[in-house]
Amino acid sequence: MGDRNVALETIDDFLAQKRIAMVGVSRERKEFSVMLFEEFCRRGYDVVPVNPNIPEVLGRRCFARVQDIQPAVDAAILMTSPGVTDTVVRDCVEAGIRRVWMYRAVGDGAVSAKAVEFCRANGIQVVPGQCPFMFWSDAHAGHRIHGFIRKITGRYPQRAGAQAA
């Protein structure tokens, strides 16, 4: 599943949402998912942690499933294994979530071809891969370099009109 199969407009729309579920956030403070959770919070997002195995993340109540979140969220970023992603996207449909980001840094990350197809078939905007840090202009230099490398290798998303060219 190529990371370029998403337009930058879809990424911009996802990042414009202010209430986001983070599914699969870790209990371990040093894990990347917690660092990303903190960064979303620092940027003013209302981030809701979802993990059935822990009661809270950084003082925020953790929910077992996205369907349990009240009030509902606008979007969900998945930090799960591909097999879990297949289940979570079905939960997102049930919860009325219309935007899903399947996080990926290396390997498959949370990306599942089956889940991407399911999202698209059910009218969910999906970001299959990528790291949100690459799309914040004021991110740490390492993340900007990662984005630059993806640009020169042709693996960075483009604007919808540019993809057809």
Image: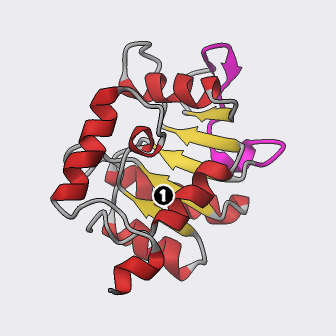
Q: Position of residue 146 (x, y in %)?
A: 25, 41
Give 35 or 159, whichever is nearer the viewer. Answer: 159
Q: Amino acid at mark 1?
A: Thr
Residue 41 seen from this side: yes
Give 160 or 14, whichever is nearer the viewer. Answer: 160
Above or below, 19 relative to 141: below
Circle 1 sits on which residue? 87
Quadrant for the C terminus in the image: bottom left
Residue under the image location 39 percent in, 47 percent down:
103
Residue under the image location 49 percent in, 54 percent down:
101
Above or below, 139 relative to 148: above
List the single residue furthest toward the left: 153
Residue 82 placement, left or right of 115: left
Q: Which corner quadrant of the image does residue 38 belong to?
A: top right
Q: Which corner quadrant of the image does residue 92 belong to?
A: bottom right
Q: Which residues are magenta?
A: 56-72
Q: Position of residue 57 (x, y in %)?
A: 59, 19
Q: Which corner quadrant of the image does residue 56 belong to?
A: top right
Residue 44 placement, left or right of 83: right
Residue under the image location 45 percent in, 43 percent down:
132
Residue 91 seen from this side: no
Magenta includes 90?
no
